[in-house]
Image (spheres, rainbow, N blue to C red):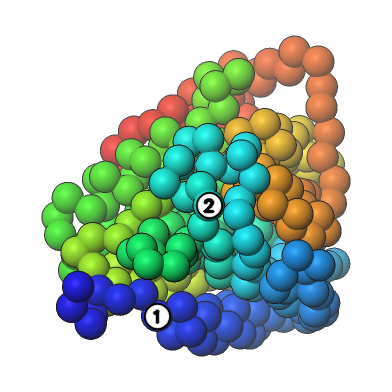
Amino acid sequence: MIEEKLPDLEKVKKYLLKLQDNICQTLELADGKGSFIEDNWQREQGGGGRTRVLTNGNVIEQGGVNFSHVYGGELPASATAARPELAGRSFQAVGVSLVIHPHNPFVPTTHANVRFFIAEKPGEEPVWWFGGGFDLTPFYPFLEDVQHWHSVAKSVCEPFGEEVYPEYKKWCDDYFFLKHRNETRGVGGLFFDDLNKPGFKQSFKTMKAIGNGFLDAYVPIIEKRKDTLFNQQQRDFQLYRRGRYVEFNLVWDRGTLFGLQTGGRTESILMSMPPLARWEYDYQPEPGSAEADLYDNYLQPREWL
């Protein structure tokens, strides 16, 4: 094994801490009022993190940007069932994850995360990989915003090969799909996991490019839509659609499940939940309405560029 393929967890951790700082500072500027409150925490089984939450800003109703570094002995059977090669290994997981729930229905909700996982056993090669991505959940979508979002996604992937963006885009469409609703959570973006080829150095570069690209993709949309006037009916629709976000995170999201299974900090894991959401029995948008436009044109996978 050559040196550049050896995983360097401390190098990844240093980058992620800086990324959290940069994202929080930039979002505070975009919001113009709110500031992130930091909550440092320790995990009894090993590790900890710093959770930062902004509430009741000009733009952001509630948002969280979380850094965590957790570690421990053997993973529970529920976590190794699909990955038997992890059995009997100690593990470390480090990452930054965020969810932003804006107040204005015309500013999309967004989620992003980048992470690194390594499992080790004396006398054996480590098992490790990178994962992450970013995705967008509009309520009143604009095609130009979606195209901007995906153009940034494509541009951050291009240095790593022409096939990367289509592959990660499809992975995102497939992953953030609510099977019980037969619809996507939003308009997708990028998602990747199990990345460890062609080696640590190049895999780390890919993860950094995607982590750094998030703000370029999201902040221009905030700036364009944050002052759009909205009414109570549009706000109610936003809260109804936020219910889908809750459904996905509690039913399908692997990160939520992994965190809870491994004794993660519940408050930090569930910071992705919106501050308000609502459900309505058998809601049907009025044909031809702006709400129908979301259902008719944005909640199934398609090529945006």
Name the residue rendered at 61%, 39% in the picture: 77
Give the Cα distance between marks 2 and 1: 21 Å
Find numbered disc 2 in the image and state the secondary structure of the residue it sits on.
Answer: loop
Residue 21: give x, y in percent of width and height: 61, 85
Mark 1 Cα-neighbour bin, 10 Å: few <14, some 14–19, many ≥20: few
Whether residue 234 sits left or right of residue 275 in the image: it is left
Residue ID at (62%, 72%): 69
Question: Viewer-proximal residue, 289 or 118?
Answer: 118
Going by the numbered disc 1, the residue's amino acid type is Asp
Indicate left or right for 59 with 154 as reference: right
Regarding residue 302, the answer to whether it shows in the image is: yes
Q: Which residue is mark 1?
A: 8
Residue at image position (37%, 41%) is 171
Badge 2 amino acid: Gly
Q: Residue furthest left?
A: 162
Q: Which residue is mark 2?
A: 88
Q: Assess whether mark 1 and mark 2 are in contact (beta carbons under 8 angstroms).
A: no
Residue 178 image offset from top left, x and y in percent = 57, 27
Percent of width and height locating residue 28: 68, 80
Q: Count up the numbered dots.
A: 2
Position of residue 52 measured from the top left corner of the image (x, y, whole percent): 75, 74
First in residue order: circle 2 vs circle 1: 1
Q: Residue furthest top?
A: 282
Tell me the number on the disc at residue 225.
Answer: none
Number of residues whose C-alpha sits closer than 10 Å to that of mark 2, classed few (under 14), some (14–19) or many (20 or more): some
As helix, strand or loop, the secondary structure at mark 1 comes to loop
Question: Which of the two discs, 2 and 1, sits closer to the camera?
Answer: 2
Q: Quadrant of residue 211?
A: bottom left
Q: Residue 125 is drawn in which quadrant?
A: bottom left
Q: Is residue 2 above or below residue 159?
A: below
Residue at image coords 23%, 80%: 4
Q: Is residue 102 visible?
A: no
